[in-house]
Amino acid sequence: MAQDPANNLRLLGLSEAIAKRWHWQVNVSIDADLSRCYVEGDRDRLPELCRWLIYDLEYGLGSLIVEETEGDWLLRYIFYGEPAGEQVHLGVRFNKKENTVPSISTIIHAANWHEREAHDLFGLVFEGHPRLINIVRHEEWPAGIHPLRQDFDASQPYPHLQVDSWRPNGVVQAPGAFMMPIGPVYADAAESALFLLESVGEDVIRTSPRFFYKFRGVEKIAEGQPLDRVLLLAERFSGTSAFAHSLAFCQAVETICQVKAPARAQALRVAFAELERFRHHVAAIAGVCNSTALAVATSQAGILEEEALRLCGSLLGHRYLFGLNLPGGVACDLDDRQIDVLSSGVQTIFRKLERLYNLLRYSSSFLDRLEEVGLVTKEQARDYGLVGPIARASGLARDLRKVLPYAAYGEVSFEVPKEEEGDGYARLRLLFREAEQSVNILGSLLSSLPIGEIAAPDLALKPGAALGWAEAPRGAAFHWLRIDEAGVVRRYHLTTPSFTNWHGFHFAAEDFAYQDFPIILASFGLSNAECDR
Amino acid sequence: MWEWVWEGIRQGIVTTGYPARAETAAGVSPGFPSGLPRTFTDPEEAETLAACCPSEALVREGRQVIFRDQRCIHCYRCLRRIAPPQEWRWQGNYEWAVSPRPRAELAKKFDKSFRRSLHLRVIDAGACGACLSEIEQLNKPYYNMHRLGFFLTPTPRDADLLLVAGPVTEHMRLPLLKAYEAMPAPKAVLALGACAIYGGVFGSSFASLGGVSSLIPVDILVPGCPPPPLAILHALLALVGRAEPHRCESIASPQGGESHV
């Protein structure tokens, strides 16, 4: 959130360009503090504005947020640029009696699932959407019930239909074609999701996934709750990326209340976030090794993962870094001894990780199973707005830590690694390289932590709404939060990297040999808890 | 491939000595808040302490504050909010398994036939991923549950025990029931973590049932958010009669321990 004069100039130029082009048709305002340009226009202007932002200015779509007010629908499309440090929010407001809005999925694929989700949860109709069917609600939900609408009572258990009627719909029409369902209960400790593998023999032609088995309605149950309760939801809806999500949430609160976390808290947040990324990547590497049935490597990576968990647990009280973030700072400080333990602990684990990497990259039978498996091209990654290590392994160096720097990321120097091939091996290499960057950030940061408080003294609550974001281990996470005067949450919307990236998963799972499926899945390393919310 | 053989030998054994010896390594468990004052002269002070707990793990009774481990989610807000604030300290405990029925009934279920070999099927009924990650650790060298005769199995038809994590979402109700019904008798259910016990931070809502016991009978439960691997190991040992459960008490779920099956 650093203010950069070049950013402000770009922001000003952008707002002028929009005002000139859509004279009298849109309202443009800029917020220099947040590096944000807000454009509000009519529904009919939406497609051309989106087309201009995406094709002429090369912005990417971050999220679509739907809010329901007394009499209006308020849709907010969030765009952010690759090299630029500003965001463009495109607002569309219309009367609640109507529920149709032009779809932008035909302009940008990335909007597809966002629109389907809004259709499912709010009952909005996106005209021209290629496949506007349910995504969140399964067959247990009666038609016409939209759980995120204001008139839906979420405090009571909802009487779902007791049906077992869902049958997969095959797409491949050929003699001998059959469908192999995997899930929702499958493999050892895999998360619940269903994958339908369509095949006419040996090779799988296409995969259709079905998600939201784990839909806990986090966004709805947050409504009407005080901030300290919602903080628990924000960090615990996805336990393997808890710190990043709690950070995005806390930053949204801080933006609304115009509070700045002290410098030491900002630096500690970066340290904890990198510690989490490091642990996550080690776990993901263990997952890839396991999927290729390379027992010794799986064990080695498993040992390193447990060592990282113990390091977190012994220093910060929780193996998965729960309970560390507070709006306005962090709850836990590190003394000099702990800092030494942390930096030497991470270094030790990293040296062993490097050793593992050097063994893996000369194991030809292992590489055979990863190379050219699960391909995602750069164009596909861009069209689908993929984020995180998956996008970066396909040549799209998109990272919120660089694009929209938050906490102390503006002050630390690090690289955003990038690979070009977009296959399983590129994704694995990227995990190793990012883990290395995390260790470097931790090393330079911990040796010069600013001195001072770890939390802002008091947080005066203000009503308002804001976007918080963080580069979670799996990619970009956006948290939209609206609170009222009493600090009660009115709307909470989560855009998670797993949701964004599962949307592009089918590219990787096309035309492959059946036995490669676990490898493709592991090299994506996504979480259903994070996707389903 | 010889390098891998050599690498395995070079690494040596890292596996914990538990249950033969207590595990003392730092960071193996988050632990419950300890060192909290429990008795107050002023009931209001007790109320203040109890009120800072978001999961109702601390409850005031008169001038005392009662701690209910089944509901604790290790947020440490109690420790950080009392004056003077206390820093988290690990007390070296992880044997947390609670049996919802008397000790004798627990032993009866499996008799002695399953003492040396028990097959587990994990069901993710809406877990956040941390519980599942801790189960995975059990399969890895530091905990290696195979050495104690516990095995993960891919199908409920081969399973003796269902390990259920998460608050049981409405969308997972049917898969969970189907898995339970597919298991051969005798079968047992382990509720893993605060979510599976009472719904955890998600509670019972329009989208989740708020605990496993509202759908199928639970035989043993492990508090924690998430329960560390050693706590899960202790529960497994307690289930087959090779360890004592920490306590026998009914489930602290809002609906009580009633079963609909």
Image: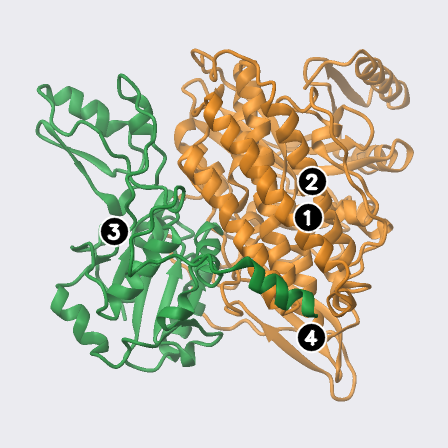
Chain colours: A orange, B green
Q: Which mark is residue A162?
A: none
Q: CA distance from mark 1 to mark 3?
A: 46 Å
Q: Residue furthest bottom?
A: A175
Q: Which residue type does callout 3 highlight?
A: Ser
Work out whether mark 1 precedes mark 2 in sequence or the reverse, and give the earlier one: 1
Work out whether mark 2 precedes mark 4 in sequence or the reverse, and give the earlier one: 2
Q: Nearest the camera: B158 or B146?
A: B146
Protein chain holding label 2: A
Q: Circles 1 and 2: CB distance less than 8 Å?
A: yes
Same chain? Circles 1 and 2: yes
**Residue under pointer 3:** B253
**Residue under pointer 4:** A515
**Residue under pointer 2:** A436
Q: In the rendering, at what x and y percent does residue A278 appear?
A: 61, 42
Same chain? Circles 3 and 4: no
Q: What is the secondary structure assignment of the residue under circle 1?
A: helix
Q: Which residue type does callout 1 highlight?
A: Glu
Q: In the rendering, at what x and y percent does residue B180 appear?
A: 36, 73
Q: CA distance from mark 1 to mark 4?
A: 28 Å
Q: What is the secondary structure assignment of the residue under circle 2?
A: helix
Other-residue count near label 1 (Cα within 10 Å), few / some / many at <14 / 14–19 / ≥20: some
